[in-house]
Amino acid sequence: MSTFEEKFGTTPDGSWRAPGRVNLIGEHTDYNDGLVLPIALPNRIVVTASRRDDGRIAVASTGHKGITEFAIDELTLASVGDWAAYPAGAAWILRESGYAIGGANLLIDSDLPSGAGLSSSAALLCATSVALLGLHGIDVDPAEVARLAQRAENQYVGAPVGLMDQMASMCCTAGHALYFDIRAMSTDQIPFNPAADDLALLVVDVKAPHRHVDGEYAARRKSCEQAAAELGVPALRSIAYDDLDNALARLHDHVVRRRVRHVVTEIRRVEDAVALMRAGRLREVGPLFTGSHASLRDDVEITVPELDVAVDTALEAGALGARMTGGGFGGCIIALVAADAAESVLAAIEKAFAEHGFTAPSSLAATPSAGASRLS
Ligand code: GAF
């Protein structure tokens, strides 16, 4: 008997997947109307589902005991807590937005490490959304599903995240990075195949414990919004790179000034990285990664010793560039390396971690993969 039948006593009607992501460059820019460049990972969340006709949703996970059950019509903000708040939030926003989803049994399975900064929250929201919509025969544009998933995370779960992770999970395509302009809501698929240039992208989970992540993320966002208000612009995207010094001179708080400098220079780094990739000069993107890391460390102040040691060690071991990726305070680094140096760079990071007494890191395959889809 399958796990689904054991949990729910019935057979599934289908299953849907949504992947996690790593962002190549463009960090803490999405909530400033900026630019981002994520790839989707092969690691994903799968939701296997069957329809119910009683208007209730039952959620189980292969990783947790028990079943959480609620009536869709009775869902109110914060009525479901813990990890089940994510599938509940997805159902809540779909109903709030007028989509006629009905009852469902949902079994969640994941090979995406949670807490590793690979966007397992967005993947769970997106996978649940596409499962609920698909189960009830409702066709919704992927970018709209991403926006709904973001609203669920903002309003139901209470995390003030931007739109990058949901868009990566919904809109990435295999073999490409997703160049996403948040202000324009436009996307472009940028071919990304490091192996073609004898390169490799390492993704290393530094296994650092997350520390005060939610409050720190919200504080970064608030500083940026405060700066935009002081400068009289709708979002920091409006500050042109060539006008940065002028904008900085108008801000009095030195912390806010540093946050602004990061956002404006990081948006420029994304533009430069995309131009280099389009010109077939991926190797030269390395220094932009390293510049991004320095900016996140010094101006945004969201790195931790494990991230800095991993990046510094990768560079000392010959990486062309390296940076933390994701929200910060733990998670993963990425490093662009010559393909034949991948193993020695990884070995150097492992050795450095042992010497520092850090938990041993682990690495993932960074194959650029497709966004959410129906599996069966
Ligand atoms: C987290 C958030 F969810 C994203 O929206 C983004 O802001 C990212 O941190 C930083 O770039 O993953």
Image: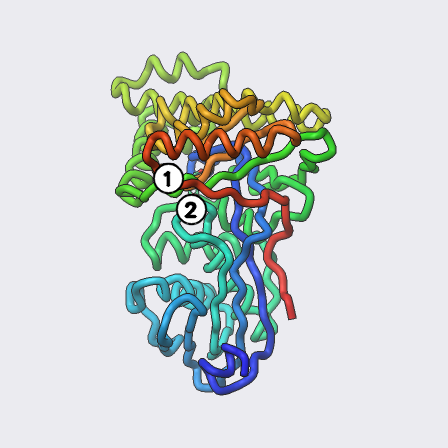
Percent from the top left, x then y, of residue 178? Answer: 61, 41
On screen, 347 above or below 245?
Answer: below
Counting other residues with Cα less than 10 Å from the Cα at mark 2, is it few (<14), some (14-19), or many (20 or more)? many
| Residue type at numbered disc 2 | Ala
Apparent side of residue 276 relative to residue 263 in the rendered image (left or right): right
Q: Circle 1 sits in a helix, a strand or a loop, which is it?
A: loop
| Residue type at numbered disc 1 | Gly
Tell me the quarter of the image containing the C terminus: bottom right
Looking at the picture, tell me which residue is in the foreground, 362 or 334: 362
| Residue at image coords 52%, 70% | 132
The residue under label 1 is: 330
| Residue at image coords 44%, 63% | 90
Percent from the top left, x then y, of residue 283? Answer: 65, 24
Q: Are marks 1 and 2 in contact (CB under 8 Å)?
A: yes
On screen, 159 above or below 75?
Answer: above
| Residue at image coords 35%, 59% | 156
Percent from the top left, x then y, of residue 164? Answer: 50, 44
Q: Is residue 303 visible?
A: no
On screen, 6 above or below 303?
Answer: below
The residue under label 2 is: 116
Quadrant observed for ligand 1 in the rendered image? top left
| Residue at image coords 59%, 32% | 342
Give whichever of discs 1 and 2 has the lower sequence position: 2
Q: Circle 2 sits in a helix, a strand or a loop, which is it?
A: loop
Looking at the picture, tell me which residue is in the foreground, 263 or 62: 62
Q: Is residue 60 visible?
A: yes
Mark 2 residue CB less than 8 A from any atom of ligand 1: no
Label total for image: 2
